Amino acid sequence: MRMTRIGLAIVAVAGFVLGAAQSNGQTTPAEIIAQLKTLRSLSATDRPVTAVKLAHAIAALPAGQDKVRLAYGLAGLSTEGDQGQATLDAAGETLAGALKETPIAAKGDEVPEPYMELAQLVKYVNVKASLDDPLFAKALKRLAENDADVARADFTLNDLNGKPVTLSALRGKVVLVNFWATWCPPCRREMPDLDKLNARFAKQGLVVLSISDEDQAKVAPFIASSGYRPVVLLDHGDVVEKQFHIEGIPKTYLFDRGSKLAGETIDQCTERQFLELLAKAGLR
């Protein structure tokens, strides 16, 4: 989740730890920061291995809020693409351990983002980590409430040609609702796979709706140059993003032929992961 939040956790802690000294041969916070910043540039083979090593390095740090921030940053980066369950488990367990050592206080009714991140890992990507903390329980409840809102949601948005598209009018189709932006690298990386699946399953009733809150002047040239073929919709004022409780992108929801919410992703997906999602609505 994501491009609007995870990077902030790394930036927030960087100023404090960059001058930290190495001790007892352990990886220093400054070294962890540097490796977190380069994770996206690694190969598909090296990235999961490095992420698991970083999880162990973060787990070995002294307890504190900066440890929580680093674990939170790693957790978000570990959900981008298909890095394997071992990577997700390591990141989730490290975040749960950091929060157990150093609980984060809530501000008002808001659940601190590290708890929300852990709850998403547990609820949506099968991470087995657990945490006996009322804020973690509240995060899980909040996700369930958000999903209930999404299941009831409907919208009408215009495509790039000004044609209105209504979600409820697509009943009988399998619909992927994908939230993205031109400035989001993980969003751009999954677009070729969405394009391929849109073409592959169109005759079986798949409709991909890609929603951006950016201006047409920015979105239209990007789409024209990319050759992306699924329907692109413009969400001026973030009206639909708010309906769907979008906190970070990319984010994708699957609605089956009965317009029921059948599944969702929490980050960038590969073709294989999208195929697993579509199978929940009977597309294979």
Image: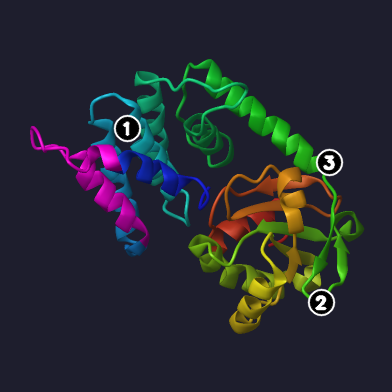
Q: Is residue 216 above or below residue 109?
A: below
| Disc with the residue nearer the chain's start (3 vs 2) | 3
Residue 152 is tagged as: 3
- What span is in magenta? 15-40
| Disc with the residue nearer the chain's start (2 vs 1) | 1
On the image, the x and y values in percent for residue 211 come to 71, 61
Q: Of 243 and 279, which appears nearest the observer?
A: 243
Question: Helix, strand, or loop for circle 2?
Answer: loop
Q: Is residue 274 rendered to the left or right of residue 105?
A: right
Label 2 – label 1 distance at C-alpha: 47 Å
On the image, the x and y values in percent for residue 174 come to 79, 59
Q: Is residue 114 above or below residue 203?
A: above
Q: Residue at x 84, y 53 (%)?
A: 155
Is 16 contained in the magenta span?
yes
Question: Helix, strand, or loop for circle 3?
Answer: helix
Is 280 contained in the magenta span?
no
User: Which residue carries the number 1 mark?
Assistant: 66
